[in-house]
Amino acid sequence: MNEDMSIDQSPHDGGDSGSISLECDDLKVTLVGAAGPVDILRDVNFSVAKGEFVSILGASGSGKTTLLRVLGGLQAAAGGKVRCNGVRVSGPPAGVVTVFQDYANSLLPWRNIRRNVGLGIEASMSKDDCYSRVDEALALVNLQDRWNEYPWRLSGGMQQRVQIARALAMKPSILLMDEPFGALDAMTRASLQDELQHVQGLTGTTIVFVTHDVEEAVYLSDRVLVLQKTPAAVGLELATALPRPRDQMSTKESPDYLRLRHKVYEALGHRVGH
Amino acid sequence: MSRLTSRFNWLGFSTFFGFIVLWELLIRLKLISFDYVPPPSEVFVAARDLILNGEMQLNLQHTLTAALVGWIIASVVGVILGVLLAVLRPMWTYSMASVDALRSLPIVAFVPVAVLLFGFSLQMEIVLSFYGALWPVLLNTFAGMRDVEPRLLEVGRVMRLSKASRIWKLQLPSATSHIVVGMRLGLAISLVLTLVAEMVGNPAGLGFALVQAAQALQPAQMFAYIVAIGVSGIILNAGLIRVARLLFSGQMASSGESK
Amino acid sequence: MRGLLPLVLLLLIWQMFGQADSPYFPPPSTWVTGVQPLLADGVLLTALGWTSLTFLLGLVLATILGATLGTLVGSNRTMDRAFGPSLEFLRVLPAASLVPLAALILGYTMQMKLAVVVLPATWPILLSCRSARRSMSPVLLDVPKTLGLSRRDRVRKVLVPALTPAVLLGIRVAGPLALIITLLVEIVTRINGLGALMGTAQANFLSAQVYGLLVIAGALGFVVNWLVTRAESAVVLRMSGRVEG
């Protein structure tokens, strides 16, 4: 194991370890539609602590992808500001990497896995250093043996792991993930969720994870932010405080988990015996 | 579902040779006879004689050199210009309409202009070959550079790649298959223009040989030359695809898969 | 519109710095006067007539030939494999190489012109119809059979409309090609038409006339391009209408 990987000393219980990774103040995002400009997001306020795993939960079309894109500097905000590691965001910030849902379109089909993973770092270090970083990253997602393959030869789950490895190779302080497991089947999704947890445990990266899946949000995160209403804002903020490491069986059967899950569904408008 | 029990198309090739045999029989049996249409056997003899006395090789060499030199220069210039046009927005806004206008000019109409300006020379052939191949390469490069998967460009922004890196690592590889298509088109055009130039201008090469053979009433020789031209075209085209697959295996294979 | 700037600029600079008596680069203003002699006795008009006639006739013949052959070859896997290589070989022969031979066999006649124009112009249409026929659902042809339609009606009411878009798309490519080959034949053989005029002007070193004729050829090319693009839009419109409806 590489000493470079910072192993967080405090348990992941909401990341109360001091510094703030990401701040979002009075964010307003406007998109121009057929009928003129429409506010997609308004008065969005939250912050993410260093090493925290935060989920942004919302229905399709709720603006959660837009929010993530603004956080990642891929889209401009109409009002308010976003700060990553204390620096105002205007364009993709250093130390922040976005992982997209469509893994097939995000990998370079003419490069093998190793060169794909090295895309972000090859310009700034020697070939040997680059390759050793790539090997570390691939080891984190258990794809070391496939370094010489081309993306189309791998399954969907593996391709997504390659995209994650590529992000990890850059040693980001913040990882933004846009429904990364949404296009995968349930079993692959479950194993990738656990792999992601494991990776975060080793690297201590701050993760902002967008999803529409309530179970996934509660299972993975330290905190869940639910986007609600139109224009969207953070309707419910819920700290999960479930013990780590979590697993698909015992965690999901624990009363705490079920209670949290119930709360989220309630907030989303579901009722018992509906 | 085609049953490719043998990858070689025996049926097709036997049909082809069947036609040739039929042609031979029809003429030999005097069932059809045109002035100046020789049977395949005579064409074969004429071809053999031309090879033996070296004329075939000489003419092939002249024409192919002119066409290929012009084509190679056009490919290099075309790719560079195509990339520039795609990357420098102002350059594009201020020239696309001109490119479109020039493009609809029938290329063969430039032959008299070239003969006028450069006289009867190899230089004239190369200039024509260059001009003809330039457009398909340029336009295909341009199209390929702009046809990049948008998500890939976003990945480039996320990775904070420099503009130059994005062009070199993302756009150009994406454009490779388009460029190869443009180069194939350009090759065909170069060959045609070179032949025409030799027929009306420079008295050398295959085009001139064809005209000479016509004047000497030697249709068998003409057929031989025509077959040689056809075969050269096939070999050059196949060679180009082979080389492209070898050099750019990743780019070619992936566009075959996904696009 | 701004995109025309380089072209306009080039012409302007040429006009300003070109010398009227230059043998190689007479300025644009001289082109009009250069072409004027051809307007007398309707020489230019006749030539344009010959070029247009050859082009149109050639395109029509190529369409009929290409559509028929393409549909036939595409309807039957065995025929496709049998005739494939022969057709492929014919396809790669550059039209230019056939001109002297055609002139020898058929003489300096309209038949010769058409023979040379029709052959290469057939291919885009043939290939387009072939692939369209190949990918046609067999059900489409079975339905009229079950309805008891005669063979003639089947072809007329089902096959032709189904393949029309493919034919039009083939014409999109074949059109400009037919024009180029027409001019090619005329330039090489000097038989008649715009190409012959260009060849003669070049042989007589009438550079202004050459450039003037080049512009006219360009205008002709532009018109042909415009026409075939309309055909292409008609196809796209029809197809998108079908998808929605």
Image (spheres, rainbow, N blue to C red):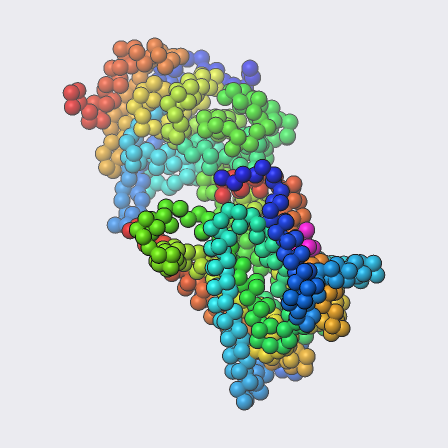
The answer to whether residue B42 shows anywhere in this view is: yes
Prevalent SS, magenta region = helix
Residue at point 54%, 63% (across, down) = C121
State which quadrant residue A252 falls in.
top left
Image coords of residue A52 (percent x, y): 39, 21
Along the line of sight, which residue is nearer the eye, B225 or C138? C138
Q: Is residue B117 above or below residue C137?
A: below
Image coords of residue A75 (percent x, y): 39, 40
Image coords of residue A168 (percent x, y): 50, 26
Residue at point 35%, 56% (across, down) = C150
The answer to whether residue B162 shows anywhere in this view is: no
Along the line of sight, which residue is nearer the eye, A30 or A59? A59
Residue at point 45%, 33% (across, down) = A103
Q: Quadrant of the C terminus of chain A?
A: top left
State which quadrant residue C100 falls in.
bottom right
Image coords of residue C218 (percent x, y): 53, 71
Q: Is residue A194 above or below residue C176?
A: above
- Indicate yes or no whether the magenta region holds residue C215: no
Q: Which segment is the magenta one?
A: B231-236
Along the line of sight, which residue is nearer the eye, C191 or B78? C191
